Image (spheres, grey):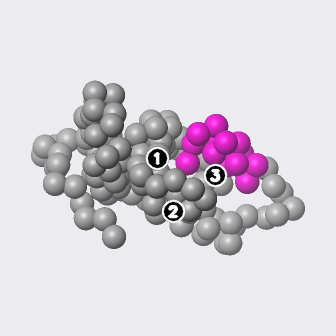
Amino acid sequence: MYRPCIISPPKNTHQHTHLQELEIIFSQLKSNYTEEYTLYNLPTIALACILPHIITMMTSWDPLEHPTQGAPLFQKWRRLLQGGSGRQGPLSQEGDPYVQLVGLVVLPPLRTAVVNRWDPRDPAAMEAFVEVSNEGGP
């Protein structure tokens, strides 16, 4: 699927700090070279760079217990990753790097939480997750 990015963090750097550095790099690339950013599919490269770090940060995440965890992170990366497939039409979201990020990081723990712990008779936890998602969270 995705190979880890060759941009590696300096030793003794936390995941969050490295993600901030990557966000700055890809934000500058997108704002300074908008056409090339899309043409060369840099959102896909950005996903390859951030995916291992986000997976590590979200490993113990329970979306029904802590629906807002990671929301600011996903909001920041959504604008840098969305629309990176370069395709248009009804199937264009399949290759969208942001959709892939959500599919790899958000959906597995959500599926586990829904199947194993969610009580449909008490929808409050799911409603809270859906609200956060609608506001741009994971």
Q: Position of residue 138 (x, y in %)?
A: 55, 48
| Sequence-first disc among 3 and 1 | 3
Residue 29, given in percent of the width and then of the height, sits at: 27, 34
| Helix, strand or loop under label 3 | loop
Q: Which mark is first along the chain, 2 or 3?
A: 3
Q: Residue at x 20, y 41 (%)?
A: 13
Between disc 1 and disc 2, whose residue precedes?
1
Picture residue at 73% right of the left edge, 54% below the top: 126
Tell me the distance, in whole angstroms, between the alpha carbons under discs 3 and 1: 30 Å
Q: In the rendering, at what x and y percent does residue 61 appear?
A: 51, 55
Question: Could you tell whether 103 is left or right of 122 in the image?
Answer: left
What secondary structure is found at the residue carrying circle 1?
A: loop
Mark 1 lies on residue: 83
Residue 61's place in the image compared with 13, above or below, is below
Mark 3 vs mark 1, foreground winner is 1
Determine whether, in the image, residue 25 is placed left or right of residue 100.
left
Q: Are there few (<14), some (14-19), or many (20+) residues within 10 Å of tag 1?
A: many
The residue singled out by tag 2 in the image is 94
In the image, the segment drawn in magenta is 125-138
